[in-house]
Image (cartoon, helix red, strand yellow):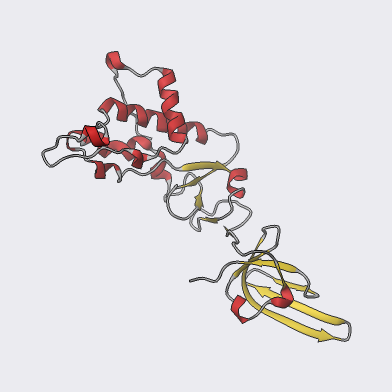
Amino acid sequence: MTELNIEYGPDQLSSDELLNLLHQIVGGRGSDSISWIGAEDGVLLEDIYGPKPTLEEFKARITAEQAFVDEKLRSEEPVFVNTASGARRIHKPSCHHVRHTLDRVECWSFVLSGYARLRPETIRGVYRLPDILTRAEVEALNSYAACQVCAPTLDHPRKRHILNSGPMKALSFGPSHMGREVATPEGEWLGTLVSHQRIVTAEGVRSVTTTTERVIEGDGTEKYTVAPKAD
């Protein structure tokens, strides 16, 4: 990753101050938390929006962000990356879709090089600090999709949050349920519902539920949760 050479001089931040800054970042104060704005003549409206961060404050933030990323990547167990924007798409750290977000110096480089002309909208172009998660933390999410390019090893290729009120019996499936995602009441994703057959035999009712992932046979009393109908 790009190296950052910082010379703070007499106003160098202490270790405690850097640690506090890191806690603020981890606590969710992302790149878009800066609330200053430039007037037409370049004068900051400090009484309304607060002062523009100094160049040294930006450098301290970058150092803290990179320290946070590096510490996570040194984990003894595998870690995964979510870009912290949009859908929860989970990647390996080496995936080309996310690795640029891990080099915090590079992410902020245009802010430092253009500091004199910096305006608030420029900050919005900085890639947010990504979420770096262990496998257990990924699986604890109520929904995610694994990147199809880097194919991280996870329990599900896609896990979707089921929002309906409760489980339903297979015998209750109808035309309106076709094409919707289904899962077990415990949350195991079963794929998209393709068809359901109810077959009456001398021994009783036989239920055959077919999804994009598997075929499940039972007596019709087995229960599923069904994703809401797409708008």
Q: Position of residue 147 (x, y in %)?
A: 50, 55
Q: For the point 27% across and 30% down, which residue is it?
A: 53
Q: Position of residue 102 (x, y in %)?
A: 42, 40
Q: For the point 44% across and 39% down, which residue is it?
A: 28
Left or right: 160, with 28 as reference point: right
Rendered view: 140 above or below 112: below
Left or right: 204, with 127 as reference point: right
Q: Position of residue 33 (x, y in %)?
A: 35, 39
Q: Position of residue 221 (x, y in %)?
A: 78, 72
Q: Quadrant of residue 18?
A: top left
Left or right: 213, with 96 as reference point: right
Q: For the point 57% across and 68% down, which residue is it?
A: 228
Count of residue discs: 0
Rendered view: 43 above or below 7: below
Q: Quadrant of residue 77?
A: top right
Q: Quadrant of residue 126?
A: top left
Rendered view: 150 above or below 58: below
Residue nearest the observer in this picture, 13 or 136: 13
Left or right: 41, with 154 as reference point: left
Residue closest to the far left: 41
